[in-house]
Amino acid sequence: MAKLKLKAGSRPPWVGLAAALWVQISAGNATNFTLYSSALKSVSGFSQQQLTFLGVANDIGESVGLLPGIACNRFPPWTVLLVGVFACFLGYGVIWLDVSQTIHPLPYWVLWIALVVASNSNAWFSTAVLVTNMRNFPLSRGTVAGILKGYSGISAAVYTVLYSLLLEQSASKLLLFLTLGIPVICLAMMYFVRPCTPPSGEDSSVHVHFVFTQAASVLLAIYLLTVTIIYDKVSLSDAVSYVLLAIVLLFLLSPLGIPIKMTLFRANAETITPLAGSTEHLAEGEGAPSQSVPLLSPSSSTSNLGSFFESEYASDVETLLAEGEGAVKKKRRPRRGEDFKFREAFIKADFWLLWIVYFLGVGSGVTVLNNLAQIGLAFGVENTTILLSLFSFCNFVGRLGSGALSEHFVRSFLIIKF
């Protein structure tokens, strides 16, 4: 694994998380297949079966994430994002050329490969920001994963609002935005998505910041669904449409309020009250020298955890010493929750259980999503933006909720057990 320079301080991880949310919105570009599939079918004269196989190409590209995962352990995040940028530009650029009839008709196999490449950009985008931010927040990995995947889930609603209010429900304009707009956004976020020194686990404000980010995402999801319904029922002027889009932009920028607040109120955020009877004080600023007297007394649960792990791994220390002396040759395999190499994870039952659950759960969802436009037409609904926005909202709720619940149950399990 390449050695990466860590950005120190308490604010950079939150700046990186705010930037990652924009990348995750970009990483949901495969959900737009419903919005332009009908135009692609009519322009190229495809049958429903041919369109379905194009949807399969969209799913294959989105799901193949082995190479991005390997790259994240060998290269800095910006290089992984750069591969996604090129894939997005190249893949959607080819599809735009066909739908806009700039180069028409293109062979079916060319469009199929282009969709695989275009949707595979999602894997590069999502993997880069997920891995980086889960390493930046090691004590809140479930919460971080839920927030990031939640924004990826709600991206379909964001694109639906853009498609309706700004792009005039034009499939050609939407594909042009996917070709140029998403790469520009991800290029702008590259500098901020970087490995950082994790924030202190003892800082109570970390929980408040996560609650703020989750609340902002929930309000954004509700707002997007409401705007989509209003636009379908009421004719809006251009001025009103731009105001509604500006509010969406404010919601997307709201996570930046955390690092801004930490900058403006640095003294209050970074000053820690010393222990009673101690005359030591922590100097203000991120580069404060370490103190010989502990600033926070460990809780009883922390002490119990420490004693548990000391006893749990005491035998491992003896094993390592024996290995160093040549008495023992066999090394200990990683335990659940530790880092696994690919070969080690591949033979674990946990890996295959997760794979099967993901295959069945996500597979059914993408099948419905790819055919959402045709499902709507079958029920006499020509404009499927509301269906897509509702699908996106429910997808968001499941992703965000699963991340929060997993973090809650993991912490509860640790407290009960130790």
Image (cartoon, helix red, strand yellow):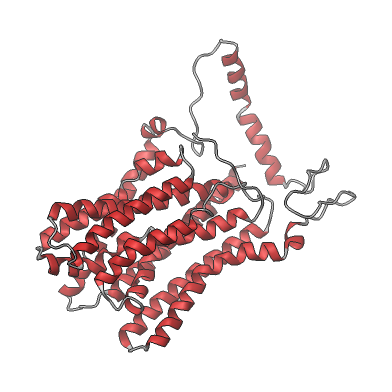
Q: Residue 122: horizontal and vertical position, in percent?
A: 36, 54
Q: Quadrant of the C terminus?
A: top right
Total labels: the figure holds: 0
Q: Residue 149: horizontal and vertical position, in percent?
A: 43, 57
Question: Which corner quadrant of the image does residue 226 belong to?
Answer: bottom left
Q: Residue 158: horizontal and vertical position, in percent?
A: 39, 70
Q: Residue at x 77, y 61 (%)?
A: 267
Q: Identify whether 240 is placed above or below 268.
A: below
Q: Nearer the viewer, residue 115 or 276?
A: 115
Q: Identify whether 94 is placed above or below 35.
A: above
Q: Residue 198: horizontal and vertical position, in percent?
A: 62, 48
Direction from residue 200 to residue 118 in the image, left or right: left
- Is residue 147 visible in the rendered structure shown here? no
Direction from residue 265 to residue 413 in the image, left or right: left
Q: Residue at x 18, y 76 (%)?
A: 379
Q: Nearer the viewer, residue 265 or 278?
A: 265
Q: Residue at x 30, y 79 (%)?
A: 168
- Is residue 267 visible in the rendered structure shown here? yes
Q: Identify whether 322 is placed above or below 18.
A: above
Q: Residue at x 40, y 38 (%)?
A: 70
Question: Which corner quadrant of the image does residue 414 belong to?
Answer: top right
